[in-house]
Image: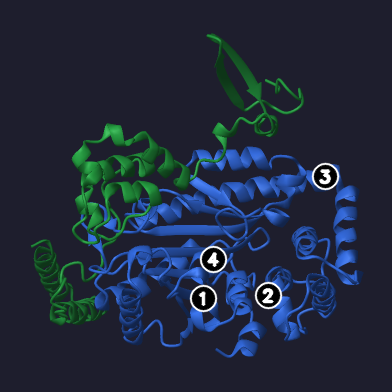
Amino acid sequence: MLCDVCQKEEATIFYKEMVNNKYSEMHLCEKCAYEQGVKKFQLPSAITNLLSALTELSPEALPRQMVEKKCPGCNSTYSDFRERGKLGCSQCYQAFNEPLADILRKIHGNIQHIGKSPLKVAVTQTQDMTKIKEIEALRKALDEAVKREEYEEAANLRDKIRDLEKEIKAEGER
Amino acid sequence: MDLKKFIDTPAQWLNSSGNHSNIVISTRVRLARNIEGIPFAHCAKESDLDKVIFQIKEAIKNNSYLTNVTMVELNKVNDLVKQLLMERHLISRELAESKKGVVFIGDKEIMNIMVNEEDHLRIQTFASGLDSRTTWEMINKIDDELSKYLNYAYSSNWGYLTACPTNVGTGMRTSVMIHLPALNITNQIRKILHAISQVGLAIRGLYGEGTEALGNFFQISNQVTLGRNEQEITDNTEKITNQIIGHEEKAREILMKNNRIQLEDQIMRAYATLTHARVIGSKEALELLSLVRLGVGIGLIKDISLKIINELLVISQPAHVQLFSGEILSSPARDVKRALIIQKNLTRGEERNV
């Protein structure tokens, strides 16, 4: 189908408009659509997704106590976030958990992280490096064991590393 | 910072040694990280930002991958140097304007860490051509090592916590800097750009968000950072980029088949202007360099390397031109100096002389 305006380019935008209760439909190529001011189809970016997610969640849609709720970490309110598009500190994620989950789902289509985690996810305030150093040493030993083809030893080392990692993670979640 | 030595040595990722270098200039990966217990940069007190800098400095000292980094405190350098760092993609405008912005620059500019930008850390690695694997492996090691000494803000549900929810999760953005002149000449670029946006990738101009795609240079990058792991993100970006490369190659073939003389004429005119003009503006330079780059890519121009052209894309920018001259120049004076720099680089082959 050719563009309704220029009749040259292929129409890739189907644009419906309602004026005085009457639908009009246009088929436009991207260039003409842009010139006609059909801004809606402009390249979606994370920012525009974020903005639309924020405006959809208007203050009325949220319970009053959420709008006024303050983050204990930085004293930012949820309306501060709506204005700036940025959170104040990492604790805001906890404080505004529920509306944020909706926003994250809108932006990313998902709300569960499945990527890497920091090596020290766990050892939060204590700065305790001993376990991490231990894991490092075990990993080196594991590499060497594999090189020497001593698989039984390698398996033992691997289990030890797993146990230590579990301990670290458990400490972190406490 | 030894400025002279720095601008005389172009970034390694411009050297066109990577995959698909005739179309892809570079691949960059960045990770956004924050330190637990300190408010995000825009909300933090200056003393907090100093704490961030101190902790990162210490972490870098202990990082075996970062033994040779240069630290630049942005409130201690002038505007020209800030602009130079922006032209080299080492800092963002936001960092240049930050009260306590610092950048750590790795050897040959293959990595850098911006401190106190939107997030406390923005770690980046660069590689020539299409190479998400090298950039990812490098940044992953740097990040693991840093995470032993820095207490990253992280939640098991939402991953790395960032100032803007658009980066939460992996905090990762893979960007490919790509040159698509034939798709533009054959009027297919809009279709391609539209298609890219449909598959969760974003496309921007040469200098990132909100910049123009001068000379048909674009940056393609992932949008989604949560719910996919790092491997999936890099694989997806690479897969889509490969498809775009395929389209660009095809467009080049079609042009060579159907409009060879016209294409060659345009390219050779651009070449002639770059090698003989006395006054060249920065926008014009980018557009002409784009055509000459296409000429090298299709084998029409043989005595210039892609490396020289890639480097010229950077060193023909305003701050570079002025720092080469050693003085602040008015815009018309810059255009004269720029013409000279381009001419010398294009007519002396591999040897750099500015």
Q: Residue at x 58, y 38 (%)?
A: B194
Instruction: Looking at the image, tell me whether mark 3 or mark 1 is earlier in sequence order.
Output: 1
Q: Residue at x 25, y 76 (%)?
A: B148
Residue where numbered disc 2 is placed: B319
Q: Position of residue A38 (x, y in %)?
A: 61, 30
Count of marks, rendered view = 4
Mark 4 and mark 1 in contact (Cβ < 8 Å)? no
- Report how far apart the C-alphas of labels 3 and 4 lie in the structure: 43 Å
Amino acid of disc 3 = Lys
Q: Looking at the figure, which quarter contains the C terminus of chain A?
A: bottom left
- Report how far apart the C-alphas of labels 1 and 4 lie in the structure: 20 Å
Q: SS class of the residue under badge 1?
A: loop
Q: SS class of the residue under badge 4?
A: helix
- Report how far apart the C-alphas of labels 3 and 1 lie in the structure: 39 Å
Q: Position of residue B70 (x, y in %)?
A: 48, 85
Residue where numbered disc 3 is placed: B257
Seen in the picture, residue B64 relative to B245 is either above or below; the reply is below
Q: Colour of chain A?
A: green
Q: Residue at x 28, y 52 (%)?
A: A114
Q: Position of residue B178 (x, y in %)?
A: 62, 57
Label drawn at residue B93: 4
Instruction: Looking at the image, tell me whether mark 3 or mark 4 is earlier in sequence order.
Output: 4
- Report how far apart the C-alphas of labels 2 and 1 lie in the structure: 21 Å
Foreground: disc 3 or disc 4: 4
Q: Is residue B49 left or right of residue B276?
A: left
> Which chain does the numbered disc 2 sit on?
B
Q: Residue at x 32, y 66 (%)?
A: B34
Instruction: Looking at the image, tell me whether mark 1 or mark 4 is earlier in sequence order.
Output: 4
- Report how far apart the C-alphas of labels 3 and 2 lie in the structure: 40 Å
The reply to the same-chain question for discs 2 and 1 is yes
Instruction: Looking at the image, tell me whether mark 2 or mark 1 is earlier in sequence order.
Output: 1
Shown in blue, the chain is: B
